[in-house]
Every structure is written in structure tokens, then in C-alpha cells.
Amino acid sequence: MDKNTSSKPPGSQGDDINAIRQACVTREFEEHLSSRTLILMASYPFLIIGKIVEVVGDYVAVKAEVTNVTELDGETFNIHIDNIEVFYIQKPGKAVIPDIRGKEDD
């Protein structure tokens, strides 16, 4: 019996699920440059809401509007795709990412 692993069908144990995930997530960000995104990460600063600036390799650059640390608002973050736990990209006709800081009344 020939045990040639190169003839395995897609989705078999020979596929690297992390590589597939990374490619899919990277493509999603590439297709939505300049869109708003909400990203949750396990590591600091945990939450970033902002515009997708560019995608280089397996990194996405996001110009932050809001983070969970006010002092970091307005900064550009280069985020490795593997560090993203959850993300949402705002698209026409879909739910809008809300202003979580709100506006103070004078």
C-alpha cells in the first residue's frame, strides 16, 4: 500500500488548520482595507476599534479610534493575525460598530 501523503484530500489531517485560518483571516482584512473593525485579543491592549490601514504578510495595521486604554487611542497598531481572538469588520448593510465611549454632554 502506497502511503504517499501528498495525495490527501483537503481537510484531511495533513492540512495545517492554523495556516488555513491565517490565510482566511488575512484575506478578510485585505478585502476590507479602510473599513472599521473591532478586534479582541487575549493580550494587552485587549480591545481595538479602528480603521484597517494595511495588511502586510500576517500582520494587520489598525489606526485605533478607541482602545480599552484611553492613552492609546489614535495610535496605529500592527497586530499579528494569530493574536486576534475575535474580530468584526463593519460592512455596508450590516451592524455598525457603536461608539463605546459615548459623547459627554456639556
Image (cartoon, helix red, strand yellow):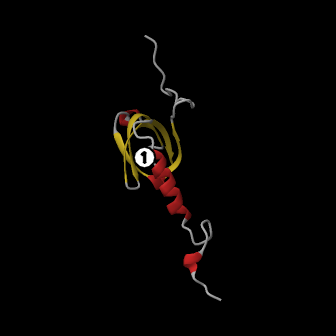
The image shows residue 77 at horizontal and vertical percentages of 37, 44
Q: Nearer the viewer, residue 32 or 72?
A: 32
Q: Nearer the viewer, residue 23 or 77?
A: 23
Picture quadrant of residue 32:
top left
Q: How many marks?
A: 1
Left/right placement of residue 42 relative to residue 80 reads right
User: Which residue corresponds to the image point at 58% horizontal and 72% vertical from the top-left?
Assistant: 14
User: Which residue corresponds to the image point at 35% horizontal and 33% vertical from the top-left?
Assistant: 74
Q: Residue furthest top?
A: 106
Q: Secondary structure at mark 1?
A: helix
Please tell me how crowded label 1 is: few (under 14), some (14-19), or many (20+) other residues with Cα within 10 Å.
Answer: some
Left/right placement of residue 77 relative to residue 98 reads left
Dot 1 corresponds to which residue? Answer: 30
Q: Specify the quadrant that holds the N terminus.
A: bottom right
Compared to residue 26, the image places residue 3 above or below, namely below
Q: Nearer the viewer, residue 68 or 97?
A: 97
Compared to residue 93, the image places residue 21 above or below, namely below
Res 37 visible: yes
Picture quadrant of residue 35:
top left
Res 68 visible: no
Picture quadrant of residue 31:
top left
User: Which residue corresponds to the image point at 36% horizontal and 34% vertical from the top-left?
Assistant: 71
Q: Amino acid at mark 1?
A: Glu
The image shows residue 70 at horizontal and vertical percentages of 40, 32
The image shows residue 20 at horizontal and vertical percentages of 53, 60
Q: Specify the quadrant that holds the C terminus.
A: top left
Q: Nearer the viewer, residue 12 or 72?
A: 12
